[in-house]
Image: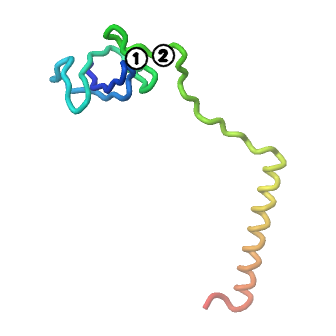
Amino acid sequence: MKINAKLEDNLLIGWGYASDDRTVGEEHDGLTVYEVNDTSQLVGGHTHLIDGVFVLDSDYQDPQPPQQQEPSPAEQITALKQQNSELQSAMLELSDILLSGGLS
């Protein structure tokens, strides 16, 4: 498949898919057309063009999603108590409205 790629000192800065009618080596809008077999190796800032082949840095690691830390049992209890307190306040307010004759 063909890609459009922007390189600086043989380091891939960015890339995108190119139309099949493009000619390999063609330059347009600051991009050059290349033929590649595998786009999984194309990572901006981590892939170099070496002897006409895109090579992903050997020490590159895929970014990991941030790990969500579960609240401790004590934090969960505190949150439930807060929610309960807010619910009780809302119910008392509603009760006062109903006892005073409702909404006007």
Who's the residue at 32% across and 27% down the image?
A: 6
Q: Position of residue 62 (x, y in %)?
A: 53, 24
Give the quarter of the figure containing the N terminus: top left
Task: Looking at this view, name the residue that lies furthest to the front.
Answer: 9
Marked residue nearer the N-terminal end (1 or 2):
1
Q: Position of residue 98 (x, y in %)?
A: 70, 85
Who's the residue at 34% across and 24% down the image?
A: 7
How packed mark 1 is, by other alpha carbons closer than 10 Å (few <14, some 14-19, many 20 or more), is many
Q: Position of residue 5 (x, y in %)?
A: 30, 25
Instruction: Give left or right: position of 66 versus 79.
Output: left
Q: In whole angstroms, how far apart are the C-alphas of marks 1 and 2?
A: 7 Å
Secondary structure under badge 1?
strand
Whether the residues at callouts 1 and 2 have beta carbons within 8 Å, the answer is: yes
Secondary structure under badge 2?
loop
Instruction: Give left or right: position of 98 versus 28.
Output: right
Residue 80, above or below 69: below
Callout 2 amino acid? Asp
Circle on res. 48:
1
Callout 1 amino acid? His
Task: Looking at this view, name the residue that lies furthest to the top.
Answer: 51
Residue 51, above or below 28: above
Question: Image quadrant of residue 22?
Answer: top left
- In this orientation, which residue lies closer to the viewer: 24 or 38? 24
> Which residue in the protein does label 2 denote?
57
- In this orientation, which residue lies closer to the viewer: 24 or 29? 29
Instruction: Give left or right: position of 60 versus 31.
Output: right
Give the quarter of the figure containing the C terminus: bottom right
Question: Image quadrant of residue 81?
Answer: bottom right
How packed mark 2 is, by other alpha carbons closer than 10 Å (few <14, some 14-19, many 20 or more), is few
Question: Image quadrant of residue 70?
Answer: top right
Q: Position of residue 87 (x, y in %)?
A: 74, 68
Circle on res. 89:
none
